[in-house]
Image (cartoon, helix red, strand yellow):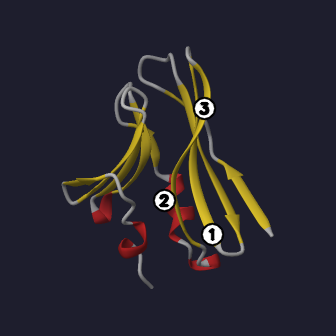
Amino acid sequence: FEYKIEFESKFSRDRKKLAKIILTKTIYTTSVSIYLENEGGNSLTKLFDKKNWFWADSANKLSKNNKWFDNDKFGLFYKPFAWYCWYSIQDKSVTFENSGKLSTESNIEKLFIL
């Protein structure tokens, strides 16, 4: 079993970069990645992996809420929990923010507990 959705591509505010979210599921794992096109070439960066909860999986809803935060950062957000996750092109790193606290480790499993 493998399931894959590529969400709509979005241009950065300066119109020089293009990014989209790719959601991939297997029986056990859900992965959310960013496909990025810019002057430096193309790249695929994994934001996080989590357990696949099938029909109750939070990644489906999260992946729909994607945007450019500025010309450098593209990622996901979920306003009801004040949760953000983005990839920075300049820093080449993934950052998570939950209620104003920054982290480099995914806290997604604790956020959406059934």
Type of residue at label 2? Leu
Residue of label 2: 62
Image spot of residue 97 (x, y percent): 28, 54
Seen at 60% across and 32% down, the residue is 43
Give the number of the disc on residue 13: none
Q: Quadrant of residue 4?
A: bottom right
Contact between marks 2 and 3 (CB within 8 A): the answer is: no
**For marks 2 and 3 on the same chain, the one whose residue lies earlier in the sequence:** 3
Mark closest to the chain's N terminus, 3 or 1: 1
84 shown above or below 81: above
Tell me the CA gap for discs 2 and 3: 21 Å
Give the residue drawn at x 55%, y 33%: 19
Q: In what element is the residue under mark 2? A: helix
Image marks 3 and 1: residues in contact by CB distance under 8 Å: no
Q: Which residue is mark 1?
A: 29
Compare marks 1 and 2 and give the one earlier in the sequence. Answer: 1
Tell me the quarter of the image containing the C terminus. Answer: bottom left
**Most foreground residue, 35 or 94:** 94
Task: Work out whether 32 lies above or below 45.
Answer: below
Label 1: few (<14), some (14–19) or many (≥20) C-alpha neighbours in 10 Å:
some
Q: What's the residue at 38%, 27% (across, down)? A: 72
Give coordinates of residue 111: x percent, y percent: 36, 72
The residue positioned 61% from the left and 65% from the top of the image is: 30
Front: mark 2 or 3: 3
Frontmost of labels 1 and 2 is 1
Q: Residues within 10 Å of mark 3 (few under 14, many from 20)?
A: few
Query: Mark 3 highlights which residue?
Result: 43
Distance Cα–Cα, label 1 vs label 2:
15 Å
The residue lying toward the viewer, choosing from 2 and 6, is 2
